[in-house]
Amino acid sequence: MTLTLRSSSEDVTATPGRLGGIPVVTVETPGDDSSAVVLYFHGGAYALGSAGDSAGLAADVARRVGVRAVSVDYRLAPEHPFPAAVDDAVAAYRALLADGTPSSEVAFVGESAGGGLVVATLVAEAGLPQPSSAVVFSPWADLTLSGDSLTGKADVDPALTAKGLQIRARDYLGETDPATPLASPVFADLTGLAPLLIQVGSHEILLDDAVRLAARAAEHDVAVELQVWPQVPHVFQGFAALLDDADAALTSAAAFTRAHWPAG
């Protein structure tokens, strides 16, 4: 079944399918370059959301980059706890490469928990080439919930609460140590990762996750860019049709992605 969605001002198609046995939704926009791919990971604290739910934002990214997006419908907690999401993400990337798409023509993009999953997948894919680049929006990268912004930004974050994240972290992790690097990539060895762009709003409790992830990447010699957008909330990029900063952030993310294609 093919769905027709509206992303910003253009119609896009979102087609369910499978990649390496993992359910995906392929998002195509008019005139895109089918040779390159944005591999997209949705948010939802590892327990909510779907590839279909994220198709609008994935399409906004894909349209600006000029390529198709493949949004991964990874398994969700608590029915499928860690490391199910990481395993599914790696399987989808492996299948994309096996289908003949070179790693240099793949970019990773993810939002919220999907942003953390992007980085975990980059760390986990031992033996696989890194994609050309990775972009993460408001990444949830520390499931120990130790960032100061969990309390310091609580009064201005309209979307997330520390208590809610505690519940979702427990659902996802079970008995796993929350500091496990593939669950909380702020504690991972990020050496050798693809160039990384991190975008976050100043009005969100995950601000410190983004700042610390950028510092960790820099510590391990990763080419990293951190953009903190003032007075905007969690995954503000999803409001590009209404918010100028969101549109500008997506345009910046697309420029970063295109700059790392082979012809960039």
Image: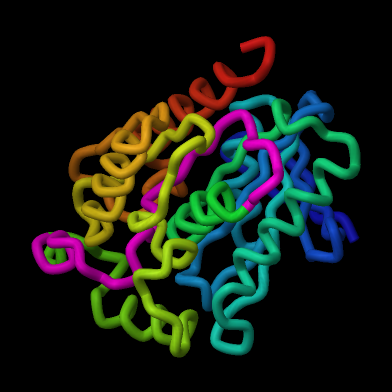
Q: Position of residue 221 (x, y in %)?
A: 37, 30
Q: Residue furthest top?
A: 263
Q: Is residue 241 visible?
A: no
Query: The magenta stretch spans which residues?
Result: 125-152
- Assess whether residue 26 is covered by the magenta stretch: no
Name the image quarter holding residue 226.
Answer: top left
Q: Main secondary structure of the magenta part?
A: loop
User: At x 77% / y 39%, what residue is drawn?
Assistant: 28
User: At x 73% / y 28%, what residue is drawn?
Assistant: 105
Horizontally, residue 217 falls left or right of residue 59, namely left
What quarter of the picture does the N terminus occupy?
Answer: bottom right
Q: Is residue 55 visible?
A: yes
State the residue in front, 80 or 16.
Answer: 80
State the residue in front, 104 or 253.
Answer: 104
Horizontally, residue 185 falls left or right of residue 262, namely left
Q: Position of residue 12 (x, y in %)?
A: 74, 41
Q: Position of residue 218 (x, y in %)?
A: 31, 34
User: At x 56% / y 47%, what residue is drawn?
Assistant: 122
Horizontally, residue 216 falls left or right of residue 113, namely left
- Assess whether residue 128 is covered by the magenta stretch: yes
Q: Position of residue 57 (x, y in %)?
A: 56, 47
In the image, is residue 243 above or below residue 51?
A: above
User: At x 55% / y 76%, what residue is drawn?
Assistant: 82
Name the image quarter holding residue 29.
Answer: top right
